[in-house]
Amino acid sequence: MAVQRVYNFNAGPSVLPREVMEQVAAEFADYHGLGYGLAEASHRSKEFEEVIHAAEANTRKLMGIPDDYAVLFLQGGASLQFAMVPMNLAVAGKPMLYADTGSWSAAAIKEAKLFGDVKVVYDGKASNFSVIGDVGEWQIDQNAAYMYVCSNNTIEGTEYHFFPDAGSVPLIADMSSDIMSCVVDVSKFGMIFAGAQKNLGPAGVTLVIMKKDLAARVGAKVPSMLKYSTHIDKESLYNTPPCIAIYMVRLVTDWLIKLGGLSAIQKINEAKSDALYGAIDGSDFYRGTAEAADRSRMNVTFRLPTEALEETFGAQAKKAGLVGLKGHRNVGGMRASIYNAMPMEGVSSLIDFMHEFETKNR
Ligand SMILES: *Cc1c(COP(=O)(O)O)cnc(C)c1O
């Protein structure tokens, strides 16, 4: 049976490298000649130990993570991090600083308010979250417990291309939707976290990279599972981890290393997003929704002249093998998520489709 080529623009869970999907399928029922699958193996087996160590080593290598940082594979998604961050890192009498750049930072702020005094240093509401603006102008109180940002706003289509200089205040970033899409200086951050299901693997595992000394801040009343220090001590094996999800992160990071690492994927991602934004800007039929300087290289959001045309665009694109282009229900319009595993050919097909659609419908 011929496999029909579909380009998957879903925002998350989202496209993974084809060769990784094929390798997982080939190894699923019989892992490396064991006679059973990794999903059936003990998380304390030498097979899984090799997998989790490789996933960590790959992550350290790709991101250049300093030795005084822990790399953890946790559960509960990025959403649990919204609560774990303040639960572990709040300090009595010190404000927690947040930049509100969209739905996911707002969700994090909501949780932080349960644990102490939140100060919002930037509020993007006035621009409908289409702008991040000049982060150099933000007032970062040096008495703060930490400063929190969401590096890529998956829903609104904006991304930080520069991070604020938080001075001695630990900078914490939710990088769920742009993790490992470009070169980042980890040493500038106290902590980075990312749900895997956009750029790293399937849902079920959350990557946490944190400076180990920060984990010591935690109070005694925090349950073991919700303490970073527990997972650092037990090297992510305090309880049964999501073995298959971690195995897939290992394969995706193998793929990234083979491709040339983050500087190589960054160039590819820039070429893809430049091409797509070029198509949008070169037409008065399509209209980008994010401020040009703050545009995301991962989630390209745009509108058509009417909602009816947007509906037709989505339906016809799907027929043409371009799926997942409908924007988030909160903001409407279209969104093309072009994560690491989306090849340039997929973006080119979308651009060709956009030109055709415009010609027929303008
Ligand atoms: C998808 C997403 C989340 C939510 O992730 P879950 O793993 O579903 O909790 C959080 N932050 C960002 C930036 C996201 O893109």
Image: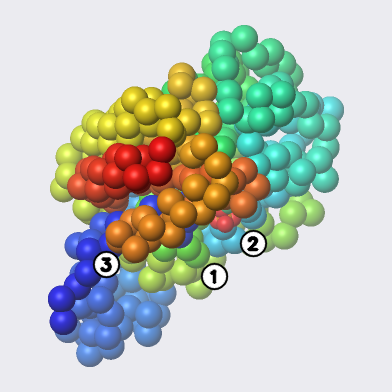
| SS category of the residue bearing label 3 | helix
- Residue found at x 43% / y 51%: 313
How many marks can you see? 3
Separation of marks 3 and 2 at Cα, in angstroms: 31 Å
x, y percent for residue 6? 28, 62
Quadrant where the N terminus lies?
A: bottom left
Residue 239's disc number: 1
| SS category of the residue bearing label 2 | helix
Are the residues flagged by discs 1 and 2 in contact, CB closer than 8 Å?
yes
Nearer to us: label 3 or label 1: 3
x, y percent for residue 19? 19, 62
Q: Is residue 330 visible?
A: yes
User: Is residue 258 toward the left or the right of residue 310 in the image?
Assistant: left
Q: Label 3: how many residues lie within 10 Å, few (<14), some (14-19) or many (20+)? A: some
In the rendered image, which quarter is residue 186 located in? top left
- Residue found at x 65% / y 47%: 330
Nearer to us: label 3 or label 2: 3
N-terminal of the pair, mark 3 or mark 1, is: 3
In the rendered image, which quarter is residue 180 located in? top left
N-terminal of the pair, mark 1 or mark 2, is: 2
* Nearest the eye: 137 or 351: 351
x, y percent for residue 177? 46, 44
Residue 21's disc number: 3
Q: Which amino acid type is shown beneath numbered disc 3?
A: Met
Vertical order, 84 against 300 (above or below): below
x, y percent for residue 141? 72, 16
Residue picked out by circle 2: 225
Separation of marks 3 and 1 at Cα, in angstroms: 27 Å
* Nearest the eye: 2 or 246: 2
